[in-house]
Image (cartoon, helix red, strand yellow):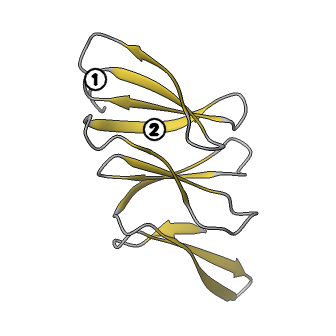
Amino acid sequence: LYFSAQEGILIFYHIKDLQYEIKICADISQPISSLIFSPDYSSLLLITDQGTVYSYRPARSGEAVKLLDTSSSCFLAADFLTPGNNYCVSVTISGEVQVWSLEDGTYLSKLNLGIEVHET
């Protein structure tokens, strides 16, 4: 079970029978608003309210890697671009859809929808 604390800490609870173990996986020092697993559960996107997106790979047990920082462009949401686990897609309130590489956070392309986007 993965969850985030208010302070921006990603925590893992390993639960087996009546025993559990707690592990702090990453500290990004920003409140995490969303956790999204890739389709094969090999990667986890950590999304902050400020529009920063981090990638965490549980099997590698490393630090979270900052992929993108959209804080200046009214970030709305991000998710994995499927099939596969190589790309992330983000959208801003202004309607700009962006595609990013999950390997190194490289910006690959964008599409402007020409309309304002809202959460539902």
Q: Residue at x 25, y 13 (%)?
A: 115
Please name the residue that numbered disc 1 is placed on.
117
Q: Residue at x 61, y 44 (%)?
A: 104
Q: Is residue 15 left or right of residue 118?
A: right
Label number found at residue 33: none
Please name the residue that numbered disc 2 is placed on.
78
Picture quarter containing residue 20? bottom right
**Could you tell me which secondary element the residue under label 2 belongs to?**
strand
Q: Position of residue 15 (x, y in %)?
A: 68, 79
**Are there few (<14), some (14-19), or many (20+) residues within 10 Å of tag 2?**
many
- Amino acid carrying label 1: it is Val
Can you say which quadrant of the picture contains the C terminus? top left
Q: Residue at x 32, y 36 (%)?
A: 76
Q: Is residue 94 left or right of residue 104?
A: left
Q: Position of residue 56 (x, y in %)?
A: 61, 58
Q: Of label 2 and label 1, which has the lower sequence position?
A: 2
Picture quarter containing residue 2? bottom right
**Are there few (<14), some (14-19), or many (20+) residues within 10 Å of tag 1?**
some
Q: Estimate the spatial distance between the alpha carbons at disc 2 and disc 1, rounded to whole Å.
A: 13 Å
Picture quarter containing residue 13? bottom right
- Amino acid carrying label 2: it is Ala
